[in-house]
Amino acid sequence: GAGVSQSPSNKVTEKGKDVELRCDPISGHTALYWYRQSLGQGLEFLIYFQGNSAPDKSGLPSDRFSAERTGGSVSTLTIQRTQQEDSAVYLCASSLGWNEKLFFGSGTQLSVL
Amino acid sequence: SQKIEQNSEALNIQEGKTATLTCNYTNYSPAYLQWYRQDPGRGPVFLLLIRENEKEKRKERLKVTFDTTLKQSLFHITASQPADSATYLCALRMDSSYKLIFGSGTRLLVRP
């Protein structure tokens, strides 16, 4: 596609439910990142993929968070047993390589009630 | 501890003036710095990259400086326009690290 696509754009869920957030990177981009942005805050790094492997998952806040990437393309971020503090905008970005500029999607606004 | 600091207060300037935004960091040795623009409800958009061995980079009305002694980068927008109003984020990457670490951003408001 023309840009990084994320779905859904908005997700409202109840505390304790699991959610899946999807990211479609720009075709040909081998590097993929997930970030989290809370209201009025900067971007918090979650995980980095190079191809299908994740050499840096140091930013995942707890074992309730996991991510995978298949076929060197689409990535899914899963949050299990959601908590209210998980409410934030989850941003995905891709780049040609790990040392290149990032192209961001518009994010998924997650609200946990 | 490692920190990237951007002025949390909004910068409010008159159209036509030069806007100067600051990014300070501590306990990092970045290979390069990047600057991004973020509009409400959108993801950040890349503007400029400056490497550790570069003092200054320009692109149209934008200029970035990088002082590794002061541990500071300055981002300038000359002849500012109301359309330049947005939040500007700096980000740095260290050698051999995959992470791009972001500051919390500074909001710029350009009055007509």
Image (cartoon, coloured by chain):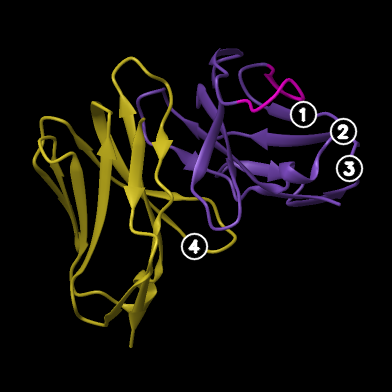
Chain colours: A purple, B yellow
Q: Are marks 2 and 1 in one subunit?
A: yes
Question: Could you tell me residue B111's position as x and y percent?
Answer: 34, 84
Q: Chain of mark 4?
A: B
Residue at which label 2 appears = A18
- In contact (CB < 8 Å): disc 3 and disc 4: no
Q: Quadrant of residue B1?
A: top left
Q: CA distance from mark 1 to mark 4?
A: 26 Å
Farthest residue to the front: give it.
B1
Numbered label attached to residue B39? 4
Task: For label 1, count other residues whose C-alpha is less than 10 Å away and answer few (under 14), some (14-19) or many (20+).
Answer: some
Please name the residue shown 65% across and 35% down the image. Answer: A24
Q: Nearer the viewer, residue B23 or A73?
A: B23
Q: What residue sits right under mark 3 in the picture?
A: A15
Q: Helix, strand, or loop for circle 1?
A: strand
Mark 1 is on which residue type? Answer: Thr
Q: Are marks 2 and 1 in contact (CB under 8 Å)?
A: yes
Query: A58 and A106: which one is in front?
Result: A58
Disc 4 residue type (three-letter)? Asp
Say if mark 3 contacts mark 1, CB within 8 Å: no
Label 2 close to label 4 by CB (< 8 Å): no
What numbered label is drawn on residue A78?
1
- For the record, the magenta segment spans A60-70
Seen from the viewer's position, the closer of residues A16 and B112 is A16
Q: Does residue B6 lie above or below A19 as drawn?
A: below
Q: Which circle's residue, 2 or 1, is located before the other in the chain?
A: 2
- Residue at image point 41% right, 22% down: A98
Instruction: Provide the chain ID for the residue under circle 2.
Output: A
